Amino acid sequence: MRKSHPVRRAVLATAATVSGIVLLLSLKPASDPGSAQAAGDAPPAAESVQGGARPIGDGTVTGDAAQTQYGAVQVRLTVSGGKITKAEAVQAPKGGQSDQVTSNAVPKLNQAAVRAQSADIDAVSGATYTSAGYKESLQSALDKARASAPADTGGGDAAQAKTVTGDVAQTQYGPVQVRITASGGKITKAEAVQAPKGGQSDQVTSNAVPKLNQAAVRAQSADIDAVSGATYTSAGYKESLQSALDKAGG
C-alpha cells in the first residue's frame, strides 16, 4: 500500500479548515434585524407627543403653511389630554392633477399623524411633495402646541390650558359663537368664531366683538354689559359664552 506524503496530508488538512471557516462565515446574517429595527423603524423618543420633557398643550393649533412645488400645505391639529385627536389639512395643492393627488394623500396623512402622534410619518406614494409639505407644517403645529403647554405640568387640571367653544346662539341678524381659552381656572382669551356679517352688521360686529372679548376676560364670567348699538349681538355673545363656560366646568 502506498503511503501518503506528509506534506500532502498537511495541505489537505489546511484546505479543509479554510473551507469550514468560509462555510461558517457564509451562514452569518449580513445585518442584525434587531439593530436595523431600532435604528430605522422606531421613531425618535423626542418626537413622541408623550415625550415627558416635551408635552403639548391642549386645544386647536395650526402649523405654518409649507410651500411646495405644487402649492401650499397647512396642517391643523386638535389636541386633548396631551394627544393628537384630529389632524386636518386646511390648505393643500389643488387644480388639475393635484386634486386627485390631494384627495388620495391627505386623508392618509391625517390618519398617519394621529397614529404616530408625531411628524415622523411616511410619505404617501405618488404624493412626495405634498407629503413633505404636510410633515413640515405638522411639525410646526406640534412645536406651537408644545410652546403653549403650561410650564408646570404637574399641577393637575388647573394647570392645563383648555380651549372650549360654546354652542351657537341664533340672533335676529345671524349666529354668534364664542370660543374661550382657560388656564389655571381663569379665562385667558375669548373670541367670537361666528358673528353677524353683511351690510351694516359688518360695522356693528367689528365694533362690538373686540369689546365683548375684553369684557369676558375682565369679568371672568358671562355677566358682561351689552355693547351700545349691538344689543342682539351682545345677547348672542353672552349666551354662547355661558355655554362655553358650562362646558369648561364653570
Image (tube, rainbow, N blue to C red):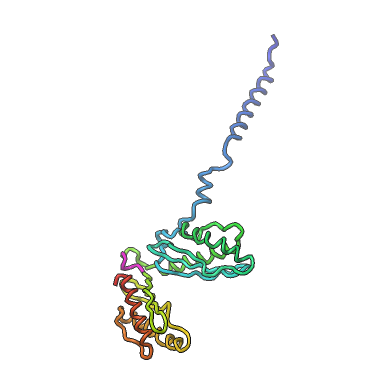
Frontmost residue, 239 versus 19: 239
Give percent across and percent down for residue 149. 39, 67
Tell me, yes or no, whether the highlighted magenta stretch contains residue 120. no
Q: Position of residue 9 (x, y in %)?
A: 66, 19
Residue 181 place in picture, x, y as percent:
37, 73
Q: Quadrant of residue 218?
A: bottom left
Q: Residue at x 53, y 51 (%)?
A: 40
Residue 246's place in the image compared with 80, above or below, is below
Q: Quadrant of the N terminus?
A: top right
Q: Residue at x 64, y 65 (%)?
A: 97
139 relative to 56 in the view: left or right: right
Residue in the picture at 50% in, 49% down: 38
Residue lying farthest bottom?
A: 229
Q: Report the quarter where the C terminus lies.
A: bottom left
Q: Magenta stretch?
A: 156-161
Splitting the image into 4 quarters, where does residue 54 fall?
Answer: bottom left
